[in-house]
Amino acid sequence: MEPNAPCMSSADRLSQARSRSRSPLNCETKEDLLTAPVLCCVILGGPGSGKSLLGSSLQQRFPGFLGISCGDLARRLTFCDKSPFLNSVAKQLKDRRRRKKAFGRVTEIVIKVVARAVSSGAFWGIIVDGLRDHELPDFESALGSRYTVLAHLSCPSDVMLSRLSSRQDREGDDRLGLVETDAAGRVQAYLERAPEETKNLRAYAEATSSRAFFDLDATLQVPSLVEDMVARLNAFAKSSGFSLDAQTAQTDTASVDWELHISEVASRLDREFHPDGKPRSKHNAAGCEKAMRRRSLGSVCSWNNRQSGPQGPTSSLQQAAPPGALKTRMAVYFASTSAVQISGLCFR
């Protein structure tokens, strides 16, 4: 999801992600989800390689699959003006010095939104694009899918540049800082990291039989590319003991109210974190709430004292004040009375 190449190697970032992010925004684990998709299909490739087009075509072929564009979700997050936390992240994205860390937070929030959306519906599978290789472990862990397919689109630079030149800037690209780098710069940055990322993707997929890696020719016409992908998916499903066509035929067309889930996640983040990303202290929050209750109680006691006469204050304090409060108030009263008497003697 990040526009530029990371400073550390892709292998190091993938290894670091496997050990779980230390960020306070860690996504929900699969134990927290109500449901989990059987198959997760992740489409990867360079800018202009056709990831979104392939994803939407596959969703039409398999109606029970939920199509997810992490890039589109990231753009939507930057327009959530009612959330102090998301507003802070949007401001950080505008600052080049803070953009790298901000993109990491955006990725974590997107994963939270996707996990919440998937857990709220009966989706047999998902098709997602816009992820980077080092983001896969957290994403896969959050969704808890049983099988994962990594579909890599191999595309030459001239084809990517040609497609990007005919693409208009999408709403939100400026907020993500994508308009500051031209198409040639984005393609060049991808080509520099592509060999290592592809190698790591293969290794990640081969680590377990529940994953598969497909290397697809992105220069094919869309119908041919889709048929190639469908054939590979069916072969993987058959080898894993299930049928895609049989499962998707029993599932309704998948749809999600993304704005609702973004709003819910944003509200939760605002409750748990300050706008700068620091966790809110539950102890301090409880202390503030307790102090507010005491202030309110003091106001009530003072009002009762004015209304009840000589016997009212003692009765009111005994019933409503916390333990020890009456003694404290009496001590303050006698101390102030003594001070007045002493000052009177001095003036005599």
Image (spheres, grey):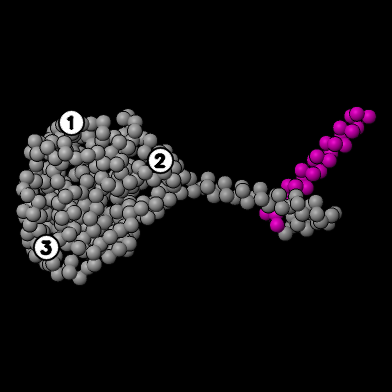
Q: Residues in magenta?
A: 320-348
Q: Can residue 140 be seen at all in this image of the molecule? A: no
- Of labels 3 and 2, earlier in sequence is 2
For residue 87, the mark is 2
Residue highlighted by disc 1: 185
Give the percent coordinates (x, y) of residue 193: 15, 36
* Quadrant holding the C terminus: top right
Give the percent coordinates (x, y) of residue 235: 7, 61
Residue highlighted by disc 3: 237
Identity of the amino acid at label 2?
Answer: Asn
User: Label 3's element?
Assistant: helix
Residue drawn at (40%, 40%) of the image: 87
In space, the residues marked 3 and 2 are separated at their CA atoms by 42 Å
Residue drawn at (79%, 52%) of the image: 305
- Of labels 3 and 1, earlier in sequence is 1
- How packed mark 1 is, by other alpha carbons closer than 10 Å (few <14, some 14-19, many 20 or more), is few
Q: In this view, does 170 lie to the left or right of 259?
A: left
Q: Does the magenta stretch include residue 30?
A: no
